[in-house]
Amino acid sequence: MQILDKPWQNWINENVARGCAYEAMLADMLKAGIAKDVAVFNLNNRSNATSVEGQGVSNQQTGPYEQEASYLFQHDNTIVTQDGQQIQVAMRVTAPDVVLLDKFMTHAECDAFCELSKSTLTKSTVVDDATGAHVGHEHRTSMGTYFTLGQNDLVKKIEARIAEITGTPVPNGEGIQILNYASGGEYRPHFDYFPDNTGGRVHTAKSGQRIITVIMYLNDVKAGGATVLPEINLSVYPKKGSALYFSYFNSKGQVDPSTLHGGSPVVDGEKWIATKWIRERTYM
Ligand SMILES: O=C(O)CCC(=O)C(=O)O
């Protein structure tokens, strides 16, 4: 997709900073003769353009988080991706920036992810604050596995879909993580961005901070297992094929503590999810 020249990128950034409506910016760009797909791509991509030029991760919180325009701008209520998936915007919160998407994946894609993961599941870990090492923890009682970037056609397809709707380059994404919770399994509330401590800096040194999470629900759960955001009293119940997007990093390098979230205990049945974390820069 064509990246617009610097004056256009500045124009987008300035208008976003002034709080201009997405639709108004899009209308002006179309009037100036820019093709719609190019305009939409560049509007969605604007925060990334800024951070790519940034100097490393700045994780020092200098005040309350300043909410900026969402990476996932709302177009129509249905987003038709380049691979033809008709995704429905089901719910949006503006602060923190949270969007629930229905029909993000087909049931066949969900089933394939579960099937491909079953033989490689191991106990999930958390990042140790002092060392940055991955260690087991009683607060996270799931099994998990990872796919490397572009590992197979299914992974490639879903990574392209995520990149398209978030306006971020595929290489900025970490490999898709699959989690499987048995009955009683949970992931207590935590932040997906890394803390500004020794362990956190091990993870942000090369690719910068995590900026966006997309949690994709791979099955229906009979009871329990909601993803919760306790700061805003939000519970999202797993629905096969839907996805929960949230972002938590702004152009000032602040992270948003109101994206505290967790997976509440599964009460009946099991729960399968796929999680994508997106970084400031190419993930390495
Ligand atoms: O299980 C869930 O719903 C939440 C998963 C989660 O918090 C994560 O993958 O970071």
Image (cartoon, helix red, strand yellow):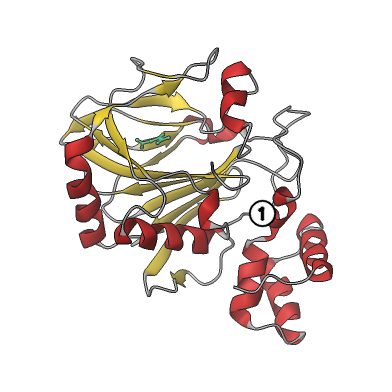
Q: Residue at x 62, y 72 (%)?
A: 40
Q: Residue at x 63, y 45 (%)?
A: 280
Instruction: Examine the rendering and report whether any part of residue 31 can be seen.
Output: yes
Q: As displayed, is residue 76 above or below residue 212? A: below
**Pick the front one: 274 or 73:** 274
The quarter of the image holding the C terminus is: top right
- Label 1 environment density (alpha carbons within 10 Å; few <14, some 14–19, many ≥20): many
- Rendered location of residue 1, percent (x, y): 59, 73
Residue 219, visible in the rendered structure: no
Residue 193 position in % (x across, y down): 56, 33
Q: Quadrant of residue 73?
A: bottom right
Q: Which kind of residue does numbered mark 1 sit on?
A: Asn
Q: Is residue 93 above or below residue 121?
A: below
Q: Which residue appears at 63% of the width and 38% of the height?
A: 208
Hey, which quadrant is residue 39 in on the image? Answer: bottom right
Q: Depth check: 125 or 105 in front?
A: 125
Q: Up-down: is 229 above or below 37?
A: above
Quickly name the residue at label 1.
48
| Numbered marks: total | 1
Q: Is mark 1 within 8 Å of ligand 1?
A: no
